[in-house]
Image (spheres, rainbow, N blue to C red):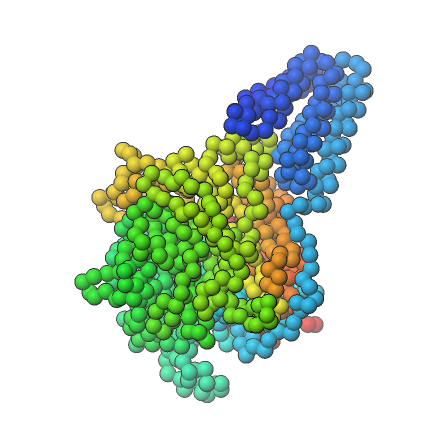
Amino acid sequence: MATDMNGTRIARWLTILFAGLSGLYLLFGGIWLLVLHGSPYYVIAGIVLLAVAWLVYRRNRWALALYALLLIVTVVWAVNEVGFDLWALAPRTDVLVIFGIWLLLPFISRTFSAPVTHAVAALVIGLIASAAVLTYAAFNDPQQIDGTVSAQSAATPTPDSQAADWPTYGRTQGGTRYSPLAQINEQNVKDLQVAWTFETGDHKGPGDPVEITDEVTPIKVGDTLFLCSPHQILFALDAASGKEKWRFDPGLKTDPSFQHVTCRGVSYHETDAARAATTAQAQAALPACSRRVILPVNNGHLFELDAATGQRCPAFADNGDLNLQNLEPVKTAGEYEPTSPPVVTDKVIVVAGSVTDNYSTSEPSGAIRGFDVETGKLLWAFDPGSDTPNAIPDDQHSFTKNSPNSWAPAAYDPQLDLVYLPMGVGTPDTWGGYRTPQQERYASGLLALNASTGKLAWFYQTVHHDLWDMDLPAQPTIADLTDVHGNVVPAIYVPAKTGNIFVLDRRTGTPLVPAPEQPVPQGPADGDWVSATQPFSQLTFRPAQNLRDTDMWGATMYDQLVCRVMFHRLRYEGPFTPPSEQGTLVFPGNLGMFEWGGIAIDTDRHLAIANPIALPFVSRLVPRGPHNPAEPPAAGQNGTGTEAGIQPQYGVPFAVTLNPFLSPFGLPCKEPAWGYVAALDLNTNQIVWKKRIGTVYDSSPLPLPFRMGMPMLGGPVTTAGHVFFIGATADNYLRAFSTDTGQELWRARLPAGGQATPMTYEANGKQYVVIAAGGHGSFGTKLGDYVIAYALPDAK
């Protein structure tokens, strides 16, 4: 009996302590929020909880009734703020519901003065009301769009002589990421199983930066799969078995100053004679390097290898090794990195690459170059920051420092002989007061060049005077559309970090979907300027309205309150709010709503599959001072090795910190969803359906399968089987969805992060789906070295 009494006494004092401390926290935090013009709810809730603590101390049964009133008021307030959105309601109610159940437990409720029946009943009603609202919200997602692709969109796949292959990064040079294969379809995709697994043996080493990533999409030609690992080791695998045929190691030596160690893919080229050789005897008679694989390496080199043997092509550059550092103004290894596969035409390799973001005003050029595919001879150059972009410097000169670069994969139209390059901004990214007009001219937009000559065809700028790193991050996609007069118009779809998808006539760059200029926030940092307007495409996934403090989130009411205070303390006036010393909320964030995965377009059904993300960042300018020098260390330029945290921006008046907008618990301050999959009808430019994707299984302390909608890195591929595949999410799964409805049809657990775009092909009459599962360092997913193929089981 004495033990029971002591236990009850401890429970009662714990109740008083919890209610009292929570009340004080909410009261004082709520006052702070109220001063910042936020919601008065937290002040009221804090006062009520303090009163509850006092009533519990006095053993007064009205503590239960008062708490029941708080529960009901909270539910009404929460629904009024966010509607019936389960994950938005959860932090507003979770702690209160749990504490309400605690108050009903016998060892607590019996400590109150009798009679307690009516007070207990009131609290039970409050809990039932809360449970009813949360249950309803669990089955009614207001962020979800339900729909079905019109039957009129159904079409027979266009005949494709290369249907069994995936010969380029986006399957086609136009980057459609669409396969006409249909052996795997909506009915049987649930039966997919592992066909083979290949382990590259390429792991993160002590000299690697945080940003080591496995983002490769393999290519498949004939009976061979070609892929590269993070250190650009090139593998040739048998497409049916996954067995290694050969490998080539370029011997990349990294150090922590590299901003990236990654390889998104390789390119393939074959001569006319190789294309014509249709028999085994004819193929055996071909000279070496009739079929070639082109491998970009992060130290600024490009290798050309015989596709059959993996041996270097001796006639190409220096025994198969082309030094891309030639004519660069800065030759520090790791500051210029070709991370994406180049475009390869019949005659020309078109090469671009990334440069270190936000390091200094003295960085490599983003010059784009065309090289002879057989000899490696420089045929042309386009230096976006030069007065004369096509001028090729002599040996005593170099390309322009800090020219805007193109780091994402490009697209190519062989009929027009135009290559379409998604352009970034000249670094540093977040303060542009020293940029020249030449550096602004071809920044943050789509650049169309003649692939044979490098001459400018047209340029369309998607962000003016970019201060947010809102470059074009993905391969654009070529797909024809039909105009209002029934004419077929050659189009190109250009996904942007802003969430806009710009639709342009690929002959001229003229918008085919209106993208009017709209006013944007003003007030730049000292010495800088901002554009008065920015283009906003009418085909878009950008949020319909600006973020509000009601959109702030957390695991509990406590960190949600902190996020609301943080939100009000930042500068935020909507998209394109200028960077500031105060700290600017950047939404869409630096990851963008679209990243390098791009979109997939079913060109037979005029249907686009997209996976936009929604994760705000905070950009804070840091003025120069004793601990923030304007010049790099005397030892020389060493890069930063990261795209988050402090970025030095040597040579301009400010450094900058760039980080996701997170709560003190490390959770996003914006409510979920942070990632979706969606279908766009390209005939109407309307979203047909949109669904959350991804769980917190690999992100939370406990492996919970809650489908909240997770951030992603990677893109979708779609097929004529009315199925699309995507990895990308922060949980380790490859998923298959119906393109008609967005219903998840199948998922496979991956042994590491799947931050790569999958692909599909046919070998020996069987369709395979392949993804690299190697993880992503800065994204925080599990690292590995796996390449996994899935297929339907053999018929018995």
Q: Position of residue 488 (x, y in %)?
A: 56, 72
Residue 515 visible in image: yes
Task: From the viewer's side, name the closer residue of 777 and 396.
Answer: 396
Q: Could you tell whether 687 is left or right of 201 in the image?
A: right
Residue located farthest toward the front when viewing the structure as drawn: 485
Residue located farthest toward the top when viewing the structure as drawn: 58
Dividing the picture into quarters, in which one does residue 444 lie? bottom left
Q: Could you tell whether 778 is left or right of 45 in the image?
A: left
Residue 231 visible in image: no
Quarter that holds the C terminus: bottom right
Q: Could you tell whether 551 is left or right of 326 in the image?
A: right
Residue at point 27%, 44% (across, down): 651
Q: Position of residue 171 (x, y in %)?
A: 51, 69
Task: From the viewer's side, name the closer residue of 135 and 317.
Answer: 135
Task: From the viewer's side, name the closer residue of 498 and 166.
Answer: 498
Is residue 226 depicted above or below 90 in this figure? below
Is residue 579 depicted above or below 488 in this figure? above
Residue located farthest toward the left when viewing the structure as drawn: 396
Residue at point 56%, 35% (across, down): 549
Dividing the picture into quarters, in which one does residue 111 lie? top right
Q: Position of residue 427 (x, y in %)?
A: 34, 50
Quarter that holds the N terminus: top right
Is residue 706 depicted above or below 741 in this figure? above
Residue at point 65%, 57% (across, down): 688
Residue at point 29%, 47% (across, down): 434
Is residue 189 depicted above or below 290 in this figure? above
